[in-house]
Amino acid sequence: MGNTREHRVAVIGGDGIGPEVLAEALKVVAAAGVDLRTREFDLGADRYVRDGFVLSDEVLEELRGVDAIMLGAVGPPIGSTDVPPGTLERGLLLRLRSELDLYVNLRPFDGVPGSIGAAASFQVVRENTEGVYAGEGGVLRRGTPHEVATQGSVNTRFGVERCVRFAFELAEASGRRHVTLVHKTNVLTFAGGLWQRVFEEVAREHPGVDTAYQHVDAACIYLVEQPERYGVVVTDNLFGDILTDLAGAVCGGIGLAASANLNPARTGPSLFEPVHGAAHDIAGKGVANPLAAIRSAAMMLEHLGEASAAARVTKAVLGLQTEIAGTTEPWSTAAVGDAVAGRL
Ligand code: IPM
Ligand code: MN
């Protein structure tokens, strides 16, 4: 049952539905018998609009000191001009991913009955600190007819290799011994070449794991037409961002898509967040689906060494998402949290 060690967890509810879905995730963790010593951090669009604060070195150091971070969602309402684009993305989310070296973004997908992906069960390992997200590039002659904008994709041997290794180790551990590399090696010959060579090298060290390669455009077709072919997918930051939204839609909706921003080397805390955003249009109505946040919390429990609680919560989430797919009446946010807790 319960653990012996109390885990220190930073809670960033954020904006819109973020705090509502995190409340249900915390409810479920408690029901699973795991004690968390939580500390709330007021960060996101609301905070930025109030006093201009995004993230400071001091707050970053405090976050470095916890065992894990749970994040709901950050972002202003669509159409709002209060927060310049990139302020929270670059200033908060991506800063946390790079400063805390959260180099794997792990996103599991299990299709619900009635979805295109009903028979699918796979995990995407998205490289989470490099590629076009690294911030390389700039603008020259801004605002003139001769403006130049570049945004390079940064791929290091070190960064690619540790991500690919993680994917193969995950395939070994999960028993679904199949890894697909997704890239665009026919056009991105420099970056793709590095990914392909590293992938082939690491694959040779894992003879028991089957491999495949797909260009990202073809992967979009297979993901819709035959998503059950995937076990573990490994890909770069931007392709992983796009593919996982598609995977969410295919497997029953983005409201179910969980993610773990992992520092597998454990040099600091990892961060757990649903893939969806703040969804201000439904905030405060008690109708947001908390299953993605709850499953992300299960991934946190796994990372914190609470394997049995993690397995129980994941099983309860998968069971309930199947049950919900078979019903037509709407479920409230709290009812979903209660139902997961009731299945533990
Ligand atoms: C995600 C989000 C982020 C990303 C944004 C908010 C910066 O879309 O976690 O998938 O692009 O990684
Ligand atoms: Mn995304």
Image (cartoon, rainbow, N blue to C red):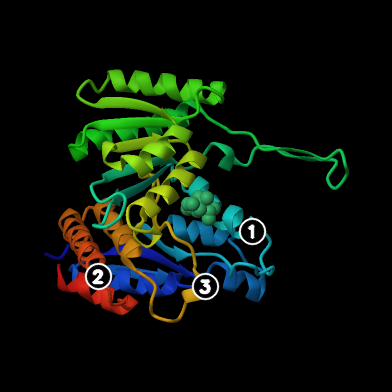
Residue 337 lies left or right of residue 218; in this view the side is left
Q: Nearer the viewer, mark 1 or mark 3?
A: 3
Which one is nearer the viewer's eye here, 192 or 247?
247
Does label 3 point to a residue whose CB lies under 8 Å from ligand 1?
A: no
Badge 1: residue crowd in 10 Å (few <14, some 14–19, many ≥20): some
Badge 2: residue crowd in 10 Å (few <14, some 14–19, many ≥20): many
Q: Is residue 51 above or below residue 70?
A: below
Q: Is residue 148 above or below residue 202?
A: below
Q: Looking at numbered disc 3 in the image, what kind of residue is underneath it?
A: His
Q: Is residue 213 above or below residue 289?
A: above
Which labelled disc corresponds to residue 28?
2
| Quarter occupied by residue 87 | bottom right
Residue 304's x, y, as percent? 27, 54
| Mark closest to the chain's N terminus, 2 or 1 | 2
| Quarter occupied by residue 114 | bottom left
Asked if the residues shown at circle 2 and circle 3 are in contact, with their CB atoms under 8 angstroms apart, the answer is no
Q: Looking at numbered disc 1 in the image, what kind of residue is underneath it?
A: Thr
* Residue 270 in sight here: no
Residue 212's x, y, as percent? 33, 26
In the picture of the structure, the residue carrying the numbered disc 1 is 87
In the picture of the structure, the residue carrying the numbered disc 3 is 280
Which labelled disc corresponds to residue 292?
none
